[in-house]
Structure formats: C-alpha cells, structure tokens
Amino acid sequence: MSCTSCGTGKPNGCKSNGGCSTGGCNRLNVHDWLANLPISDLSAECKIVEITFNNGSRKEFYRNHSLQTYFKGELVTVEGVGGFDVGTVNLSGELVRLQLKKKGIKEDSPEIKKILRRSNDLDIQKWKESKEREKPSLTRARAVIIQMKLDMKLIEVEFQADGRKATFYYTAEDRVDFRELIKVYASEFKVKVEMKQIGLRQEAAKIGGIGSCGRELCCSTWLSDFKSVNTTAARYQNLSINQVKLSGQCGRLKCCLNYELDTYLDALQHFPTHAETLELARGRATLIKKDIFKNLMWYVLPDSNKQYPVPIERVREIKALNAKGQRPDELGAVELSPAKAEEKEMAHVELVGQISLRTLERNSRKRRDRERQQQPPRGPQGGQRPPSRGGNEPGRGGNRRPPQQDRRRPS
C-alpha cells in the first residue's frame, strides 16, 4: 500500500504515523524495528535524528534540542546554509546511535545542526516552490556547461527549501576548473552555489532504473556502501569474463558480484589446491571449471574437446600418484545421469514468447481462404458478373456505362 492511499487522515508526514515500511517514497528506506519498544530511561535516549532529503538520496544527522517526539515520515524544518531546509524523518532512537557509531560521528559533535520545528504550511509551500525550480534549472545549467565547453556532466540540481542555496552534482573524469562556472550560476539563479563531484555508481543511484535481474537497482534502493568489485570475483564463481554482461548501468562491474563471493570462497576451501593440471598416461588434463554444488572438477584432455567431470576425491588420488611419479591410465570421470542433464536443459528453455512456424503457416493459409470466399463470383468467361441493379441504371440518377465496358476481356 502506497503512502498516498493510507487513509488515516492525520497530517504526520506521509500519513503513515511512523509505520511506513513500503519504501515507495524513500530511496534508501530504513525500517525502525525499535520504534514501538518502551524506553525505560528517557534521559539516556539518543538526541540525534536522521533526516533524509530529496526522496532519500541524501541523509544527514540533526540534533533534537527540543526533545520532541518525531515519527518516521514526518516533515521537519532544520538549519540550513544561511536559512532553513525541509527534510523527512528517517530514523530516531537507538538505531541512530548505531548509525553514528558506524560512520564514526560523535554524538556530542558541535558540527551537528539542530532541528528547528515541525514544518508548517509556509515552510512546505516554500519547499515545494524550490523543488519546482530544479528541473528548469538543471536544463539551463547543462546549457551553460556546453557553452563554456567544460569536460563534465551535470547530474542533478538540489535547491534548499528557502531557495538560498543550490547544490550541483556532477561527474568528471579529470579535474575541472569551474570557478567561472560558479560565477555564472550565481548570477543566473541568484543563489549560493555548491559544486559536489560524485562517482559513476552514485550517478546511477540518483538516476535509478531496472537492473538485468528485473528489480530496481540496489544502489537506488538500499545499497549505500560501494565496495570495490574486480574480475576475480567472477572467476571464483565460474562466470565468463564478458564485460558487457558483467557491467551495470553505471558502466562498472555489478555490485552483486560480491554478494555470493564469500559462499563460493568457503565452498572452494574443500577443493584440492594446485590441481590445474593432472598427468595421465595419455597426456596432461587441464582444469577448466569447478562445480561447488556437485563437488566436481571438469577437465579436458589434449586429444579431445570433451569435458570430463571428476570428483574431488579422485583428483586427490591422481595428485598423490603424480607426486610419486606415477601416471594413471584414466581420469575416473563420473557419468551424469541423463535425467539430470535433461532437467538442466529444460531449466534454461524460454517458454515465454515462443512462436511456431507451423502456426504462422496455418494462419496465413486461413487468411488466404477467407479472402477467396469474400471475392465476388466470376462469370462464364472469367470476368465478374454485372450487378443486377445498380445506381448507374437509367432512372436511378446516373448514366450506365456500355455493356462492353462492364465486361473484362477474356484471357
């Protein structure tokens, strides 16, 4: 259920009264699972509240000096740069203390700004007016960059609620001298300008989209810490090194390559090491892949292109024989049952949107038969029969053509 159809009728933020968990109105939505627990000592409660801006794309911490109770999804007015800003309450209570510890921010830090009040109608009106300026300002700001021929890409413009400050988010490969650009923006938009450079992953998080998995991008919904991803993670998971398939919408390697990497590393610990090649009587077998689900290692021989699945116990035996200078005759590959192979093939069959050529031929044949039935009957000499009575007959408002013009010339 979306926040607009909550139906409680109360003015607290998105009308959810702190129980909103859909995440539809907040990109990096967080469920406060300690919200309904009673607090024994109010003096020990955390006085810091996490506030989100621009639909959750930016989060900051503010001090609750008035000790009022703020619910999740409630609009509050906070201190800004030379004015005020309007944000949405995202977290409060003990979970904020854990977030402060995670990000290395002290609870008594003097740099933490204050929450001024709950947003009134005037604050909300100014906030909406500032938000309406963002899209036309973004278009104009990009045109200025093109005119000045700067090697940078402007991603987003965020105005403060009172309209006194604007933050311009951009991406650039090299260092950009935008001192003149700031002067043009300040005179053009009549605001205090702040330029903030972001990475390509942050750009994809702000733009959003649907990934190859069919779900919304992780970076725009819940992922906030971007760890480095390299092709080693793909090799451990036996994935083909295809830059097109392994890259996300940001142009970098997909963050989801790290999700199952630890599981693969734990499973690969039971596999024998230094088993890339095995010496046999018929030649040297080369390892091509490992199957952690069936505990098999696939080898290929030099005289054939066939792949042989070998159990890890047999690989250890062959390694022990090679250490003694012996070469076994066979690999000892196992035979996979046809039923499992058939199930594996059926699992990858795409049953959606398949079209049979026979069905198309049948439909085209039916269409031709229908067209023949709708054609007028032919005369004895192959021409069309003249109409029995038509609008061109004498006395019906027209001159009838001569009979020889009504008949077709016989072939």
Image: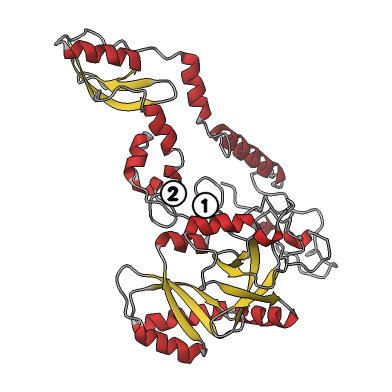
Residue 318 position within the rendered picture, expressed as x and y whole percent measured from the top left = 24, 13
* Above-or-below relation of 152 to 7: below
Residue 347 position within the rendered picture, expressed as x and y whole percent measured from the top left = 52, 28
Viewer can see residue 311: no
Q: In this figure, which residue is indicated by the disc labeled 1?
A: 218
SS label for mark 2: helix
In the image, is 323 to the left or to the right of 230? Answer: left
Residue 331 position within the rendered picture, expressed as x and y whole percent measured from the top left = 27, 12
Task: Tell me the number on the disc at residue 78.
Answer: none
In the image, is 326 to the left or to the right of 174? Answer: left
Q: Are marks 2 and 1 in contact (CB under 8 Å)?
A: yes
Question: Which residue is at a point 53% across and 34% down the rendered structure image?
Answer: 350
Amino acid type at mark 1 = Cys
Total count of labels: 2
Q: Nearer the viewer, residue 245 or 79?
A: 79
Q: Residue furthest right?
A: 395
